[in-house]
Image (cartoon, grey):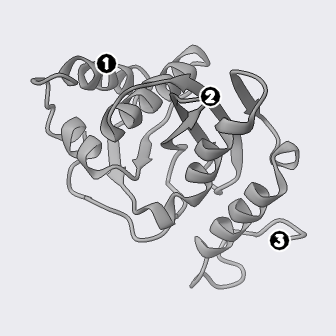
Amino acid sequence: MNSHQQSTSKWGTSRERKLNVDAAKFEIAVERWMGADFVVRNMSGEVELAGTRRMLTSQTVEAAELSALVWSLRCRQRENTVIKEIELDCKAVVDWIKGRHLSGVLGHVVEDCLNLTVSIYCDTVLHCPRKCNEVMHLLAKRAKDISEEAVAWLDISHMPNDIQLVIMREFRSSFEGFEVGSGFCIPEGC
């Protein structure tokens, strides 16, 4: 696992397919729930797939983030998707994965994450501040209101409008500083 880069300061494109993951905790009728979600983007920063899922939980934030990561990685593994880079906004979880922290109550979940990252050929796990993971956090919170247990989107035009807008804003910001003709383009309507 690549450990030379510790954190990102804004959302940005990757040299290969990138997976962003997040979780949010909430209550419904005095039960503790969490929303787990992921977004897969290609090298151009375009969303290829996004998903959100609601699950019962009584876990810590770190356990919820690990659960979201395991669910996301299993989804990617089932689709035989190669993901070279993963970003999470929970620094403790990133540190546990990079440090191969297998002891403690959540050690077995960290081990699951490590095994799953190998199965999708991931070699980089990065921490990104929440402000760089805004789409993910919105999707995780949205899990509270979905009528199904899980929802997936192959086309961002089917996603809620507020999330589409944040995706476009992040996409644009990732190209700040690039000159016209640099090989990157922002889709019409952005």
Image coordinates of residue 135 in percent, x first then y, are 62, 55
- Identify the residue at horizontal 70%, vertical 47% (top origin): 47
Image coordinates of residue 128 in percent, x first then y, are 39, 59
**Image: 82 above or below 140:** above
| Mark 3 / mark 2, whichever is N-terminal | 2
Secondary structure beneath disc 2? strand
Secondary structure beneath disc 3? loop
Image coordinates of residue 30 in percent, x first then y, are 54, 30
| Mark 1 / mark 2, whichever is N-terminal | 2
| Mark 3 / mark 1, whichever is N-terminal | 1
Image coordinates of residue 119 in percent, x first then y, are 40, 19
The residue furthest left is 103
Q: CA distance from mark 3 to mark 2?
A: 28 Å
Q: Which mark is residue 53?
A: 2
- Identify the residue at horizontal 75%, vertical 69% (top origin): 185
Question: From the viewer's perspective, is the residue at label 3 or at label 2 nearer?
Answer: 2
Q: Which mark is residue 190?
A: 3
- Identify the residue at horizontal 73%, vertical 56% (top origin): 163
Question: From the viewer's perspective, is the residue at label 3 or at label 1 nearer?
Answer: 1
- C-beta proximity under 8 Å, tags 3 and 1: no
Picture quadrant of residue 180: bottom right
Tell me: 110 left or right of 59: left
- Mark 3: few, some, or many residues within 10 Å (few <14, many ≥20)? few
